[in-house]
Image (spheres, coloured by chain):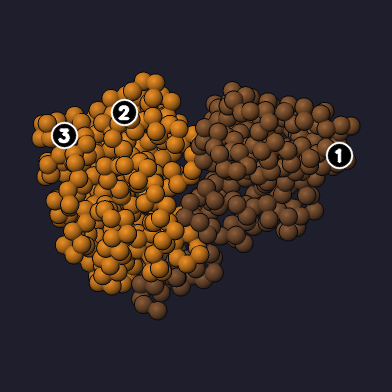
Chain colours: A orange, B brown
Amino acid sequence: MSVPYLGFGMGLRTCYFEQIISERPAIDWFEIISENYFVSGGKPWYYLSQIKEQYPIVMHGVSMSIGSTDDINTDYLKQLKRTIARVNPAWVSDHLCFSALGDFNSHDLLPMPYTEEALNHLTQRISQVQDYLERPMIFENVSSYLTYKQSHMTEWEFLAQLHKQTGCQFLLDINNVYVSARNHSFSAMDYLNAIPKESIAQIHLAGHQDFDSHIIDTHDEPVCDAVWSLFSEFSQQVSAVSTMIERDDNFPPLAELLAELEHAKALTRTHWG
Amino acid sequence: MSDLATLQHAFIALLHNENNSLANNIVDQAPLEVCQRLEIYQSAYRIRLRGVLEQDHETLGFYLGDELFEAMMDGYINYYPSQSRSLRQFGERLPEFLRITPPFSEHGILAEIAEFERILLSSFDSGDASLLRWPQLQAIDINQWPNMVLQLHPSVYFFKCAYASVESWRALKEKKTPPLADIHEPHHWLIARGTDHRTGFHPLDKKQWLCLKSIADGMPFSMVCQSIVGEFDDEQTCSMFVIGVLQLGIEQGWFSGVNMLHGTLV
């Protein structure tokens, strides 16, 4: 599976709806949070229907819980499939994690152990979900704050193996790599060097809160210098990958996010064109 | 249970504050203690859910004051863990929690304010539909009017209050002192999304309420009139009143269309 290269995009958030429609900023594409459009109508759909006439849209979910050991939630998949049909996105992504179990939903992206069992479980679930949706899915690496004793491979070895077994592609969040690297004392560049380059379909760039002893992945700050450096170095190892700024809180004026997008473009201009 | 399932159940138990068995499965890595690593997830879980309640029930928070609102959020998160994939639904059972949990249950207005805020949210992102225009009704032969069945817009909700909950909500929104909670007789409201996509609420008197509820029940125009004729001196006054409600509803965007009793779409 290969996804089209869309250029440099941004997470579509409600606070920017009107400005995007009235000013048509130079952004190549937008990523929406899938679950925000599971509602029937109203303001979200009113604005999205106008924005999607002008820009390509991709969908990014936060609640699929692909790694859960309970049954696949077909109600969720039904809603997702219905929304995909209405949005017609360039691709659809979610996270490599579990978030729900039984009736309980944590609304968090809880990490998987890096074991053979988890690998085989994910391989089976990804296949089930893709069959149901009748389209390939892309999965994002999550940031984490703990390492399971059961893990017997690194995260990047786990991803490489998953790609080999399923052929699925990844949404590489370079901020998440940096957050986990700092929290678990591994080299973020080792991670980026090792991950199969052909597996990367999209890149997220975001910010976090740095508490010195650890980092919390908040996506509410500008992209930090260390993440920019990682992105710059990684971008030289891959052909052009659709890249976006993901801001989820503490929203600045749109111009600030556009400036970050310009910076991302500048860092890749020589090799991505 | 598989190792993976055991680990996931232990993680969920940790978030529920049920047990800490997950700690035995976590690598001890400096500089953070294992318990600090687990606390990051425990805190994030509660912070996220509290954020949803603060956003969805901001005005209820003003009514309760900080201390009670904190207690309400803690209690609700403990007893009503999220069962939905979307955070949008997390607060759905808050009115129920407030109705049955002391000390909140001693003040019936609290559950009503929460319910009102839930209805505002539901109306806000309900389905879209075209709006009925007056010329569409005028085009119907007057002899056929008794057979017409009006369709309410999907964003229309009805709300009957035993307390001054909507008035209190509005006062707090305007940073004014809310009125006394007790009222002599029930107050009726219609909530709907306007053409500007904002959600609005409109007081209804008893006759308007009965009339619109009959329409909501799918009754044709003739039966809508019959359902409230007892409130009037004669049938003609009653019909004129119902037509007045239709005019108001069309102006406000409460109707999405009209069918004829025998299935003809207008």
Please rate how many residues cluster around mark 2, counting C-alpha atoms within 10 Å: few if below 14, some from 14 to 19, many from 20: some
As drawn, the label of residue A54 is 2
User: Alpha carbon of mark 1 to alpha carbon of mark 3: how far?
Assistant: 77 Å
As drawn, the label of residue A268 is 3
Q: Which of the two residues, B196 or A85, is positioned nearer the viewer here?
A: A85
Task: Select label 2 or label 1 by which is in front.
Answer: 1
Q: Is residue B245 left or right of residue A85?
A: right
Q: Residue at x 23, y 44 (%)?
A: A202
Sequence-first tag of 3 and 2: 2
Q: What element does badge 2 sit on?
A: helix
Task: Give the percent coordinates (x, y) of residue A65.
Answer: 38, 59
* Quadrant position of the C terminus of chain B in the picture: top right
Q: Which residue is mark 1?
A: B230
Please rate how many residues cluster around mark 1, counting C-alpha atoms within 10 Å: few if below 14, some from 14 to 19, many from 20: few
**Residue B130 visible (yes or no):** yes
**CB-based contact (under 8 Å), mark 1 and mark 3:** no
Q: Residue at x 60, y 52 (%)?
A: B92
Task: Select label 1 or label 3 by which is in front.
Answer: 1
Q: Amino acid at mark 1?
A: Gly
